[in-house]
Amino acid sequence: MSINLHRPIPEGFEVKQVRVVFKASGWYAQLICRADVSVPDVMPHGEPIGIDLGLEKFLAISTGELVERPRFRKDLQSKLRWLQRKLRNKKKGSPNYRKIQAKIRTLHEHIHNVRREFDFLTAHKLCDIAGMIFAEDLNLKMTSRGMLAKHCLDAGWGSFLDILKWVSWKRGVYFAKVDPNGTSQTCPQCGAHTGKKELNERVHHCDECGYLTYSHA
């Protein structure tokens, strides 16, 4: 079967598996290749930064920079609901039913592609400014429950952290997850313990070194 090969198979790699995937935009073949090459682990080096994921802002960086949260699914929610209403009014299995089904699949794929592109661009921007990146090891199962579940799932923190880990490894940037417990109680400037903060408290002031910063995540 003829295919559109997007890039040649690298020299020295052997194709071990082919996975055929159907998407709304067509059929795809994913090639899994192997090469007997030893890749060393990335060691800590360079400028360190910490990142904090949130809902008001997608990302807060320890340098003070904030990244706005694009609402991937929320912005297209009205169109998705309109298509789903049309689908309910069509006879199941009819040509019009299948046409609307295809439009819904295409819309979901578009949301996935836009989110993935944003994650890759953000990951590369972080790697441009740091040699080490540290992120909180969040309990993503807990964040996907409750009244803010839809917003947390729309933000896609889990997929972003997976992409950031892969991009960091590819670009030689050290990436690690840290225990989130007590991170807001430790001064990032001198390491002193500043005491417990309430969830609505967004100002950090260290009595030891005088460091002052604000959180918008």
Image (cartoon, rainbow, N blue to C red):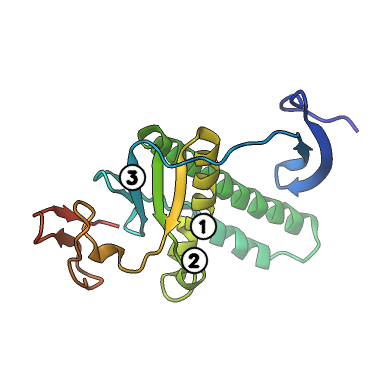
Q: Quadrant of the N terminus?
A: top right
Q: Using the rendered image of the protein, determine whether residue 210 is visible from the camera's viewpoint.
A: yes
Disc 3 marks a residue whose amino acid type is Ile
Disc 1 marks a residue whose amino acid type is Gly
Question: Which tag is nearer the camera, tag 3 or tag 1?
Answer: 3
Q: Is residue 56 left or right of residue 148?
A: left
Q: Is residue 193 left or right of residue 54?
A: left
Measuring from the top left, give residue 158's x and y in whole percent: 51, 57
Q: Can you tell which mark lies on residue 140?
A: 2
Task: In the displayed orientation, state which residue is furthest to the right.
Answer: 1
Q: Using the rendered image of the protein, determine whether residue 59 is visible from the camera's viewpoint.
A: no
Marked residue nearer the N-terminal end (3 or 2): 3
Q: Which residue is at a point 16% across and 61% down the rendered structure image? A: 203
Up/down of 9 relative to 16, above or below? above
Up/down of 131 relative to 77, above or below? above
Tell me whether circle 1 and circle 2 mark residues in contact (CB < 8 Å). Answer: yes
Decide which of 147, 18 is in the foreground and name it: 18
Q: Is residue 79 left or right of residue 1?
A: left
C-alpha gap between disc 3 and disc 1: 19 Å
Tell me whether circle 3 and circle 2 mark residues in contact (CB < 8 Å). Answer: no
Badge 3 element: strand
C-alpha gap between disc 3 and disc 2: 22 Å
Measuring from the top left, give residue 109's x and y in whole percent: 62, 48
Badge 1 element: helix
Decide: few, some or many residues near mark 1? Use Cα within 10 Å; few <14, some 14-19, many ≥20: some
Marked residue nearer the N-terminal end (1 or 2): 2
The residue wearing badge 3 is: 49
The residue wearing badge 1 is: 158
